[in-house]
Image (cartoon, helix red, strand yellow):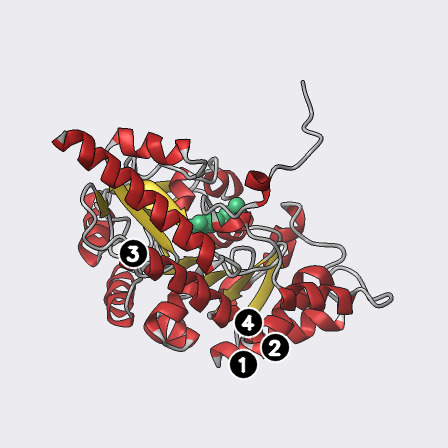
Amino acid sequence: MTHATTTSPADTAQQFASDNYAGICPDAWAAMAEANAGHAPAYGDDRWTTLAADAFRSLFKADCEVFFVFNGTAANSLALASLCQSYHGVICSDMSHVETDECGAPEFFSNGSKLLVAPSTDGKLTPAAIRAIATNRTDIHFPKPRVVTITQPTETGLVYRPEELQALSATCRELGLVLHMDGSRFANACASLGCEPADITWRVGVDVLCFGGTKNGMAAGEAILFFDRRLAEDFDYRCKQAGQLASKMRFLSAPWVRMIDSGAWLRNGQHANACAQRVARGLDGVQGIEPMFPVQANGVFLKMAPPLVEALRAKGWRFYTFIGGCVRLMFAWDSQPERVDELVRDLREVAAAAAGAANG
Ligand SMILES: *Cc1c(COP(=O)(O)O)cnc(C)c1O
């Protein structure tokens, strides 16, 4: 194996393959430095953790129970496990992170609760899809549907509007289902809709929210908010057993205090969303490149012929194509507008070259 001894400019230039490529935002970094000034009680008995939970309660205007874990897979899996018995089922979209990107963790931590996967064309769940799965089988041989999980914004960069959420939760109530929201990019949804966090959670019937800090600009950490406190019973034990009780909890919680107080959580989401819009605008009318989904949050998904995809790679860009073969571009709190423009320029160039070749 060889080791690179120098860093070429290409290695430090921003890439938009994932919002997790970004570093730690200044507010989160400063909060960690502040929390690092001396000793503090461990395992969440510190003042930062108390302040962070209170910050969430005032941000959401709700007396919710708040927990902090290291990552989104744990947040989702443990939240879902706490809502289910092992014989229950969790209704989710076929494009959901819990189904496609968590290595079976929701099933593992729930001791076997089955994901009941709804087909979708765009990653969104609908009341009809929920109803179809929840009422298809009522016999004892099939897992009993218990939870619906939705992602806000979706893995395809779409945002559920408050009235859509209201309709989903009405269906859940009617069918005796609990509503969980995977908000690994929750800030981007709030920024996109311009609404209060409460307007797309407990006010429209969401019972549990996993609020992502990592993609919002923290080093690590997700908050789990139980709006129905009864659902949080023994959740602390569940976190500990799963290896998710941070001994130096203050470094997971302190960044939230500052980011909520300063509004950085929302500004970061707004900036990332604006970069996605910049790309969408820059590609408007370009032949051979089409958005696969409307751009509503911080992701852009581009339908392009395979030779164009390869040409874009050849220009040094990194990206994933796991959603229907399209080029996925994700923007973050620190995405540089000039670098976003370079990406747009290169996209336009590969499209123009392909069009030229076809005509010539
Ligand atoms: C990134 C992400 C998560 C969290 O993933 P981890 O890598 O476990 O932190 C959860 N849900 C969605 C939709 C995501 O995009």
Q: Which sits earlier in the primary sequence, circle 4 or circle 3?
A: 4
The quadrant in which residue 151 appears is bottom left
What residue sits right under mark 2 in the picture? 54
Instruction: Say above or below: 241 vs 27.
Output: above
Q: Which sits earlier in the primary sequence, circle 4 or circle 1?
A: 1
Question: CA–CA distance between discs 1 and 3?
Answer: 39 Å
Question: CA–CA distance between discs 4 and 3?
Answer: 27 Å
Percent position of residue 77, x then y: 50, 48
- The disc label shown at residue 282, or none: 3
Is residue 199 shown left or right of residue 336?
Answer: left
Q: Which sits earlier in the primary sequence, circle 2 or circle 4?
A: 2
What residue sits right under mark 1 in the picture? 58
How many numbered callouts?
4
- The disc label shown at residue 264, or none: 4
- The disc label shown at residue 203, or none: none
Question: CA–CA distance between discs 4 and 1?
Answer: 16 Å
Could you say which is closer to the camera, residue 325 or residue 75? 325
Percent position of residue 149, x then y: 37, 54
- Secondary structure type for disc 4: helix
- Disc 2 vs disc 1: Cβ atoms closer than 8 Å? yes
* Kind of residue sitting beneath label 3: Gly
* Kind of residue sitting beneath label 1: Ser
Can you name the residue that lies furthest to the left here?
359
* Kind of residue sitting beneath label 4: Ala
- Disc 2 vs disc 3: Cβ atoms closer than 8 Å? no
Is residue 139 shown left or right of residue 199?
Answer: left
* Kind of residue sitting beneath label 2: Asp
